[in-house]
Image (cartoon, helix red, strand yellow):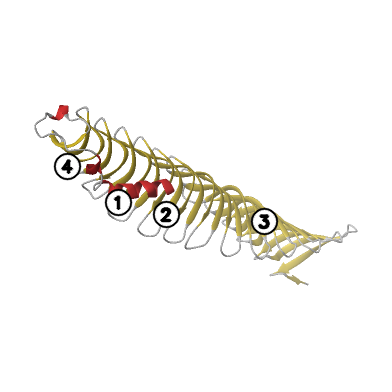
Amino acid sequence: MKKIIILFLSLIIFSNTYAKDLPKCSFWKAVNKYDNCIGEHKYKNGTYKGAYVDGVPNGKGQFLNDAGEIYIGDFVNFKFEGLGTLQIESGQKYSGEFLNGLFHGNGIYEWPDGQKYIGEYINGKRYGQGKMNWPDGGSYIGSYKNDLRHGYGKQIWADGSTYEGEYLNGLKHGKATAIHGETKNKMVGEYVDDYFAKGTIYLSSGDIVKGNWDKDHKQQGKGEYIWKEGDRYVGDFKDDEMSGYGKIFYASGMIYEGDILKNKRHGVGKIKYKDGQIFQGEFLNDKRNGMGKITWANGDTSYGSFKDGKRHGSHDYTYSDGTKKKLLYVKGKKVE
């Protein structure tokens, strides 16, 4: 950065100093005879004014082409080489180092809308370390390759969103940490082709989600959801919902294991209660529905139908000593 500041200041004073270093070229000599002097000549694609050596622009000078673009800086054999400033007709401007007519080294590139890049170039392209600023307040600082973000970098958006991690050919790709400006959700993990693919999301609500996501930002496959209250789900996800097979560990001590559909217990499953009671059977929309069996800690069992989470209909009750009897329930209440 210090080097860029020095070269920029050098360019500011250049146009007023180069003419003092050498005498003017003789008006009577042909341009190919100009040597160690300051001259001016109209070439087929523009006009050059500056230092000549052996009939060729060498040293400090300026070139205005027919498209209205102007370069002020160092020349080597009529090529931009060294320190210089190129003002493009569209209003864009580059100030910095050149090699063989191309941006090469450290430089500053500015756009009319306020965008600005400060950093390294190789063969006319951003390559190496650099910083990009946008007029809305956003910025990127990090590594570039062939004009694209590539390697490690950090980007900040105007809405407060941030991404810090690896890039590949201009896309977020690799290990990274990102924060969404609006939701304040924090993602820690791996990106693939510009989307968060694997890792942990710390939601602003206090909940935590672990797993895999597709390019549409929907969670798929094996994962984990931890509620701030202490409940925890471990199992399958489909299209951003708990669906498939999984376990739910409740803060109360209860554990469910079985089928899940759209975030609800649905299908066949098993519940272990904190007091030792076990239910194994069918679920519908998060409630016991269908056939099931309750086993109490003392060994008693009850097998029969359930509705809306309660015993409903005929049940075969078996005591721990092997005694059996038929019981009838309606909405959880035993009918004598």
Please tell me the numbered disc located at residue 67.
Answer: 4
Badge 1 crowding class, 10 Å Cα cut-off, few under 14, some 14 to 19, many 20 or more, is some
Q: What type is the residue that disc 4 sits on?
A: Ala
Q: What type is the residue that disc 1 sits on?
A: Trp
Which is nearer the N-term, disc 3 or disc 1?
Answer: 1
Between marks 2 and 4, how big is the CA–CA gap? 32 Å
Q: Of circles 4 and 3, which is in front?
A: 4
User: How far from the left and from the top, in percent, is residue 39?
Assistant: 17, 37
Which is nearer the N-term, disc 4 or disc 3?
Answer: 4
Q: Secondary structure at mark 3?
A: strand
Q: Secondary structure at mark 4?
A: loop
Between marks 1 and 2, how big is the CA–CA gap? 14 Å
Quarter of the image with the C terminus is bottom right
Is the residue under label 2 in contact with that under label 1 (CB below 8 Å)? no
Residue lying at 32% horizontally and 46% vertically, measured from the top left: 95
Badge 2 crowding class, 10 Å Cα cut-off, few under 14, some 14 to 19, many 20 or more, is some
Q: Does residue 172 appear to the left or right of 91 in the view shown?
A: right
Residue bearing mark 2: 139
- Count up the numbered dots: 4
Badge 4 crowding class, 10 Å Cα cut-off, few under 14, some 14 to 19, many 20 or more, is few
Instruction: Write down the quadrant of residue 68 in the picture.
Output: top left
Which is nearer the N-term, disc 2 or disc 3?
Answer: 2
Residue bearing mark 3: 282
Instruction: For residue 71, say whether it is visible.
Output: no
Residue lying at 47% horizontally and 61% vertically, measured from the top left: 181
Q: In this rendering, is residue 305 above or below 151?
A: below
Q: Of circles 2 and 4, which is in front?
A: 4
Residue bearing mark 1: 111
Who is closer to the viewer here, 303 or 224? 224
Is the residue under label 3 in contact with that under label 4 (CB below 8 Å)? no
User: How far from the left and from the top, in percent, is residue 65?
Assistant: 17, 40
